Image (tube, coloured by chain):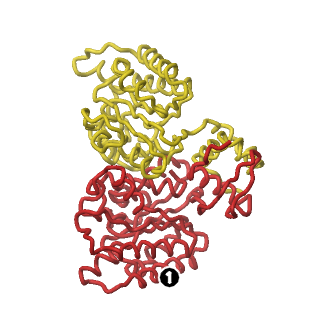
Amino acid sequence: MTTPLTRRAMLAGTAITAATLAGCKATGSSTSSGEEVVCEEPPAIFLKPGATVLLQGDSITDAGRSRKTQDTANDFDMLGKGYAKLIAYHLLTEHADKQLKIYNRGISGHKVPDLDKRWDKDCIDLKPDVLSILIGVNDMWHKMNGRYDGTVESYEAGYKALLARTRASLPDVQIIVCEPFVLRCGAIKDIWFPEFDQRRAGAKAAAESVGAVFVPFQSMFDAAVAAGSPPNHWAGDGVHPSAHGQGLMAARWLSDTGLG
Amino acid sequence: MTQPISRRQLLTTTAAAASTAAIAAAAIPGQAQAHPHVMAAMKPAITLKPGATVLLQGDSITDAGRKKDNLEPNNKDALGKGYASLIAYHLLTAHKDKNLKLYNRGISGHKVPDLDGRWDRDCIELKPDVLSIMIGVNDYWHTVAFGSKYKGTVESYKTGFHALLQRTKDALPEVQLVLCEPFVVRDADRTTRADWFPEFSDRQAVAKEAAKSFGAVWVPFQTMFDDAVAAGTPNKHWSGDAIHVNGNGAALMAMRWLHETGLA
């Protein structure tokens, strides 16, 4: 039998077997059919009944959410208008029996140090079972505007420290790190590179430092553009995704977490 | 282990098992017996072979402003602005090594007999490996609006839909079918287009039954939107007229389609 297992199927398989079979992360395991199953992917995310899911980040996550109802889980206005809300309503409809509590606490303009300052209130105190973070575009953008002096190194170090702190306070939290991304249009000029790529690598290294699921939004948008769509279809200014961009992000997030 | 396995994970595991001689059974023998849903989920998800053609068919909700004179696969203008385009770009990015060909051939206003009239050109000749159909809203709507010129019944919808699917299976024995539930995005107190029910429910039941008869993956959009409204969203958030979805509704549909097909 030579039918390749899809990546997604391997992910799901990994998640199921993780608790019952040790060593899925080894190079492979034989099956009754003799096929090698390689489980290279991190485990998918589990949602237990009553789980709290927190989405954190900057304006892309914020997407116009209401601050007034921010303590009310699953509130329509609190969830904003972006990928966080799309993810929330997919989970709330597909897992309607689980009584999930979903929060969006993204804040427009924020960078890693801004998350760090509000992390007790806006993350630890909420005791999330699942935490998704998308942060990094402002860490670069604000530096280029002369409003911030962070470096590639301080971004990666700060991000790793934030995640380590989270893991220390919430040992069982399942973490998802979303890759910061830009589209090559609008505000995004050649001068962003290669530094932005180095920052993306920093986010990936931070994800690996705590065993987080990494959602590769930059690769996704690069592939979408390579497939024939213009960059501004996904984000007019190169940074803030359109409804289409948000939809694609939510689909990918759900896919890579195994919750799709 | 007490952690419940999500339905989605069961589905994909089952799909993987189906194509690789029961990996799931080999890997988690105790689990399979412990969870009755494992047996219930023995429906295979959709598989995408390299070079597969995926065709999305339907009415205005699928059409979503696509350029009718552009017949190319994977073309942004040809894919429209709705759930079909989001599905397409998710598949093209998540499975970019597979060289998939995605087509949208939905046409605004169409009913089952309209699909039948253009099926050779717009389905059979494209030889889809995966065919998704969402049809039924106009089969009802045109009997009660626009001068009620259409005289179709629940029975003729059923007969016509079954005939279309049988013809498809005869011409394309290997095609993997996905049937999407026609829907109305109702408000919480169910007053939105209340006059559509229960006859519209009868047609939804026909579509669901057809999915079962033809071994198609069923995508329950009505349940999904009912759940979304029950979870606290205004129905207007997904659709202005309760029939044509906006970008938010299209995104939710695309995610559910990807989920149910196992292609997410």
- The quarter of the picture where the N terminus of chain B appears is bottom right
Locate residue A167: give its quadrant: bottom right
Locate residue B11: give its quadrant: top right
Q: Position of residue A24 (x, y in %)?
A: 69, 61
The answer to whether A132 is drawn above or below residue B153 in the figure is below
Q: Position of residue A207 (x, y in %)?
A: 51, 71
Residue B243 visible in the snapshot: no
Residue B109 visible in the snapshot: yes
The answer to whether A38 is drawn above or below residue B251 in the figure is below
Q: Position of residue A67 (x, y in %)?
A: 33, 67
Camera-side residue of B237 and B176: B176
Camera-side residue of A238 and B254: A238
Chain B shade in the render: yellow
The answer to whether B209 is drawn above or below residue A36 in the figure is above
Question: What residue do we see at 29% from left, 57% from top?
Answer: A231
Lateral position of residue B96 relative to residue B117, left or right? right
Q: Position of residue B49 (x, y in %)?
A: 53, 41
Badge 1 crowding class, 10 Å Cα cut-off, few under 14, some 14 to 19, many 20 or more, is some
Question: What residue do we see at 46% from left, 52% from top?
Answer: B94
Camera-side residue of A52 and B245: B245
**Callout 1 amino acid:** Ala
Secondary structure of the residue carrying tag 1 is helix
Give the chain of mark 1. Answer: A
For the image, the number of numbered tags is 1
Q: Which residue is mark 1?
A: A161
* Extreme residue toward the bottom, this view: A149
Question: What residue do we see at 37% from left, 59% from top?
Answer: A222
Q: Which chain is red?
A: A
Locate residue B3: give its quadrant: bottom right
